[in-house]
Amino acid sequence: MYLGIVKGTVVAARKADGLEGVKLLLVQPVDEHGAAVGDVQAAVDTVQAGDGDLVYLVGSREAALACNPWFVPVDAAIVGIVDGIGLPTKAGP
Amino acid sequence: MVAPMWATVKHPAFAGRALFVVQPLDERGGDAGGSFVAVDHAQAGIGDRVLVLTEGNGVRQILKAGDTVPIRSIIVGVVDHVEPA
């Protein structure tokens, strides 16, 4: 699973069976500091995320398992909206 | 090494599960690759070095919560000590 920031919406009227009514969002994967990691991707939204939200996603087969029905051609799904991250301080004890 | 993460709105499969951001380390404690998100199954704490399983079928075997759990990464141990040869 990995972090990302929602960067927009993908509208697709014609989709594979099982994806009717599924919401697709553009997501920029990021690290825990919010810095971009890799390329923007399209992901299924399961949590009603919005533009600018920091979210976490699941990839590969587990992304399809987050959907209902679950036997769908999906390889990235937003499964939570992040409220905060408790980063350890750099200056240790 | 782990940092706790909070999320109120999440997929039902994550209800009641603690989440961490995990930074992979090499055997000497240096960063080894990009960070990712994992569910906790070992009562990990902030800054702990941990063992992580990153394979969905293994996760489903451990959690015993059905065949459609959309979780790929899970913390399965807290490391006390590493002795590089």
Image (cartoon, coloured by chain):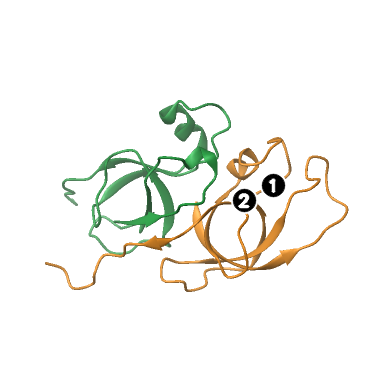
Pair 1/2: label in front = 2
Residue B54 point in image, percent of width and height: 45, 44
Chain B is which colour?
Answer: green
Q: Chain of mark 2?
A: A
- Circle 2 Cα neighbour tier, 10 Å, few/some/many (<14 / 14–19 / ≥20): many
The label on residue B83 is: none
Q: Position of residue A87 (x, y in %)?
A: 31, 65
Residue A59 visible in rendering: yes
Q: How many marks?
A: 2
> Label 1 is placed on what type of residue?
Val
Residue A46, above or below B34: above
Q: Do discs 1 and 2 belong to a common subunit?
A: yes
Q: In the image, which disc is placed on residue A77? A: 2
- The residue pinned by badge 1 equals A74
Colour of the chain lettered A: orange
Q: In the picture shown, does residue A79 fall above or below A4?
A: above
| Residue shown at the point (18%, 73%) measured from the top left | A91
Tell me if I can see residue B55 in this picture.
no
The Cα atoms of the two marked residues, 1 and 2, are separated by: 7 Å
Q: Residue at x 68, y 61 (%)?
A: A25
Helix, strand or loop status at disc 2: strand
Q: State which quarter of the image contains the C terminus of chain A.
A: bottom left
The three-letter code of the residue at mark 2 reads Ala
Task: Find out whether the residues at labels 1 and 2 contact each other: C-beta distance under 8 Å.
Answer: yes
B69 to B47, vertically: above or below: above
Q: Secondary structure at mark 1?
A: loop
Tag 1 subunit:
A
Q: Position of residue B47 (x, y in %)?
A: 24, 57
Residue at figure coordinates x 37%, y 62% from the top left? A85
